Image (cartoon, helix red, strand yellow):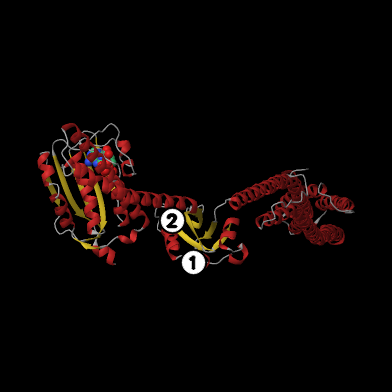
Amino acid sequence: MKTIKGKLTVVYIALIMIILVVGAVSVLNVYTLGKSIDGLITDNYKSIDAVDKMRRAIDAQDRGILKYLQGEKEEAVELFYQNNDQFNTWYYFEKYNITENGEEDMVKKVNTKYVQFNKMLSELQEKDNVSANDFYKKDITPTLNELKTDLDALSELNEKAMFDKKQLTSSSAEHSIYIIFIVSISAAAVGLFLSVIFTNKFIRPIYLLINAVKSVKEGEVNKQAAIVYDDEIGLLAREFNNMTYRLYEFEKSTKGTLLAEKNRSTSIIKSISDPLMVLDSSFKIKFVNDACESFFGIDEESIFNKHFLQVVKRVDLYDYVFKVVSEGNEDEGEIIDIKRNNKTYFFNVTTRPIKDKDLKIDGVIVLFKNVTELKQLEMLKTDFIGTVSHELKTPLTSIMMGVGLLKNNKVGSLNEKQLRIIETFQEDVEKLNELVSNLLKISKLETDRAVFDIEPCNILDVINKSVEGYTELLQEKRLSVYYELSENLPNVMADHEKVTWVLNNIISNAIRYTEKGYITIGAYSDENKVYIYVKDTGRGIPFKYLEKIFDKFVRVEGVQIMPESTGLGLSIAKEIVEAHGGEIWCESNVNEGSKFTFTLPIESRVNQ
Ligand code: ADP
């Protein structure tokens, strides 16, 4: 029997067999007991009863003889014969109910005596009164007494047998109780033994399996359960072992892959030529690459778990990283300069949060992209433009003066042809002068933002002053001006002169690129800034130029407007607006018009 079901069936069958044996023994004993009680009540008791009735019949016949002797002959004979029948009935009953040894002989003896008694009765009837009395006394009475004695003996035999049987029945009942008791105790003991043996046998593999499961739960994934029997539990243990083996293999391979992946990531990060730091969610340093170690002169072990600020002592940078990571600010990159070994390095610092599986921020990657060379090139370019523009400015001024003198006939009169050539000269020189002035302005803005004279200023004053300068030009082009100005505009924090320059540039562009219609100038504010816009109904700007027009020297192609523009105005405007912490942008539809908007911070915001 290999299966638990089979084993259980065997145990149950064994138990049923034991119960059957106990039952059979009990039934047999009860049956034997019943039988002996039956014998006790029926056979002997019937014999005693029959003897008793025979005796009564004899007594009645005896009384009949006495009646006969007293002269009541007829009545006596009737009584006599009636009881003769009675006697015979019970005699035959007893004759066929012989159960004891010697009983048969006794019955025969009774019969002989009774036959003798009957004969005497016949003899009695033939005698006269005197001899009859005599005959009764001398012959009948002794015979009768002997008959009674025989009947008593017969009765006693049966009584004794009955008593013996009663004794036997009692001892048989005791015996039965004893046997049933012994058999029941033995059956219970065998049942208990079988149950204990088989329960332990069945339960042991289950316990072993449970222990194996516990070990796996505690991390011993390659634990194998013992296979004790080839039954269902054995099958379960085998499947469990397969499972733990696969689990172990899986863990081994996953760990291996993860380790390989980690090593790969670490070597990639280590090999990045720009400094890189990995921080945890509380900005403690968890990892730095080689470039970081050599630039900051640190080693990974000594700074491990130190706060970012303890190593990179830049509160502005920490603020930037904190805002990107914790407040979700856009990571535009923060340009910072760090002095090391008497040299200034420029870095574009970008930061990226590391999120865990629940998308909660678990750490931060901070990359210091070295842009020192780019910055140096840019500075070189600005210096160069500044120097060249400055150098050009003096000869240009003298050329312009010379051209002006020639044109105004201050050095002799010119003919028509010479005048036209000089006028073309003048236009080109003015344009060149404008370009050089703009370039100088740009290089100045880029190199030194501190030249800004920022103070609270009323934007309506700026607008009015700016529009005033264009009154003539607007009339010339028949363009009207509308205002959309919110009431109670707060003051802005700005360099009055430079903001006027920005507005002038935008308004002059609007007039320049609008043939008919009108120009709208508006201003409104929110809690942080004031928005100033200039809207026109001119030619508009194609979508692809909307961003680019704020770059240097960019002009929309195919637009030829005299005097030809330099493409520097909007880039200067952008420089100025951004230096104020504002933004500038353009919305436009070709042939419908353009809207230029820029923002400036309001006074209260700056003071906070
Ligand atoms: P410029 O000083 O040459 O005007 P800007 O930088 O001011 O240069 O402008 C760049 C280009 O943007 C212009 O050449 C012109 O093509 C386009 N532009 C600027 N303002 C407008 C406007 N209001 N409507 C249409 N085009 C414009």
Q: Are marks 2 and 1 in contact (CB under 8 Å)?
A: no
Q: Amino acid at mark 2?
A: Ile
> Which quarter of the picture shows residue 131?
bottom right
> Going by the image, does 555 lie left or right of 412?
right
Q: Which circle marks residue 313 in the picture?
A: 1
Q: Is residue 68 left or right of residue 285?
A: right
> Residue at position x 18%, y 55% from top?
462
Q: Amino acid at mark 1?
A: Lys
Q: Secondary structure at mark 2?
A: strand
- In this rendering, would 416 be left or right of 236? left
- Residue found 22% across the figure and 43% down from its top: 403
Numbered disc 1: secondary structure: loop
- Left/right of residue 259 with respect to residue 466 in the rendered view: right
- Residue 507 placed where, x, y %? 19, 46
Q: Quarter of the image for the N terminus: give it.
A: top right
Q: Quadrant of residue 497?
A: bottom left
Callout 2 environment at 10 Å: few (<14), some (14 to 19), or many (20+)?
Answer: some
Return the residue found at the far front. 412
Residue 68 seen in render: no
The residue that disc 2 covers is 335
Q: Nearer the viewer, residue 177 or 458?
A: 458
Q: Earlier in the sequence, mark 2 or mark 1?
A: 1
The image's mark for residue 437 is none
- Return the x and y of residue 498 as percentages of the image width and height: 25, 55
Mark 2–mark 1 distance (CA, rounded to whole Å): 15 Å
